[in-house]
Amino acid sequence: MPNHDLIYLTEAERYDRLIARMDPGGNIPRVLRKLVPLPGELQMLDMGAGTGRLSCLLAPLVKSILATDASPPMLEVAAARLTGMGWANWKTRCGSHLSVPAEDQSFDLITAGWTLCYLTSARVEGWEAHLEQIMKEIHRLLRPGGTAVIFENFGTGAELPDPPDFLTPYYRLLETKYGFSHEWIRTDYHFESQEEAEELTRFFFGEELAEKVRKERWQTVPECAGVWWKRPTVD
């Protein structure tokens, strides 16, 4: 499996090429509009914003965005994308999910897209404590009546949900311990060519998926995403 930490630090632009191919059917904005009053005067936190997948999508629909990430190169790409789109209602800030650099009750919407899993995978020592601390941070940062929305991998290369087994304990706790509601959506990748599909899936997802892409001659690679959301009661 490729080293994602290294990719995020050294190949942010190539990663962004992959993300640009995601969800041509618009299922991500569709589910967000269902869960959150968009457009609206919302102040948003994008945790683990990366190269701006969700920030760029929501910049036209919210009042302001704080995009945080542990990787400065990823945030540099996000900033360039947002600037290129003509938006000025955003800031970026480096920081950890365990201690988000923002004031209490600052946000009406918190998103975390394909990012909390790096601290909450069952392969990570202390993952349950990490998840508990992240939930405390979301509770601290969200305003009364606000919404937290989490997206995670629910099966790449799969037309129906097939979540990684090392993430299912984390997903289960989101629902049973922390009270999140859940559904899944398709977030397929549509590439410019079958060759690009093979190249970029090998780069980020590894040999097994790339070989499947080659054998099936996929230009569109199916993917499922899990969506969890909650409107916590703030003390």
Image (cartoon, grey):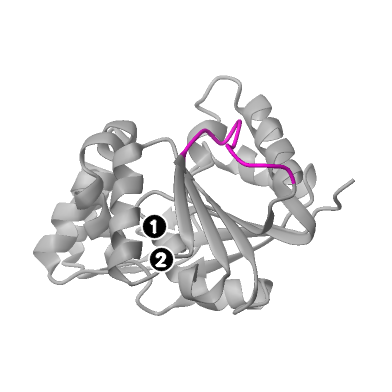
Q: Would residue 150 appear left or right of 208 to someone viewing this image? A: right
Residue 103 magenta-highlighted? yes
Q: Would residue 5 appear left or right of 96 to someone viewing this image? A: left
Q: Which residue is located at x 47 percent, y 69 percent?
A: 59
Residue sitting farthest toward the left: 195
| Secondary structure of residue under mark 1 | loop
* Camera sees residue 181: yes
| Disc 1 crowd, CA 10 A, few/some/many (<14, 14-19, 20+) | many
Q: Say what amino acid the circle numbered 2 marks.
A: Cys
Q: Say what amino acid the circle numbered 1 marks.
A: Gly
Alpha carbon of mark 2 to alpha carbon of mark 1: how far?
5 Å
Q: Residue 56 carries which label?
A: 2
Q: Which residue is located at x 80 percent, y 53 percent?
A: 232
| Secondary structure of residue under mark 2 | helix
Q: Would residue 138 appear left or right of 15 to someone viewing this image? A: right
Q: Quadrant of residue 139?
A: top right
Q: Residue 52 carries which label?
A: 1
Q: Where is residue 169 in the image (x, y as percent from the top left)?
A: 63, 38
| Residues marked 2 and 1 touching at CB (< 8 Å) | yes
Q: How many marks?
A: 2
Q: Where is residue 229 in the image (x, y as percent from the top left)?
A: 68, 59
Q: Which residue is located at x 20 percent, y 70 percent?
A: 219
Q: Position of residue 162 (x, y in %)?
A: 49, 54
Q: In which quarter of the image is residue 36?
A: bottom right
Q: Where is residue 14 in the image (x, y as percent from the top left)?
A: 19, 51
Question: Is the stretch drawn in magenta largely helix, strand or loop?
Answer: loop
* Camera sees residue 2: no
Residue sitting farthest toward the top: 125
Q: Would residue 37 appear left or right of 219 to someone viewing this image? A: right
| Segment tinted magenta in the rendering | 94-104
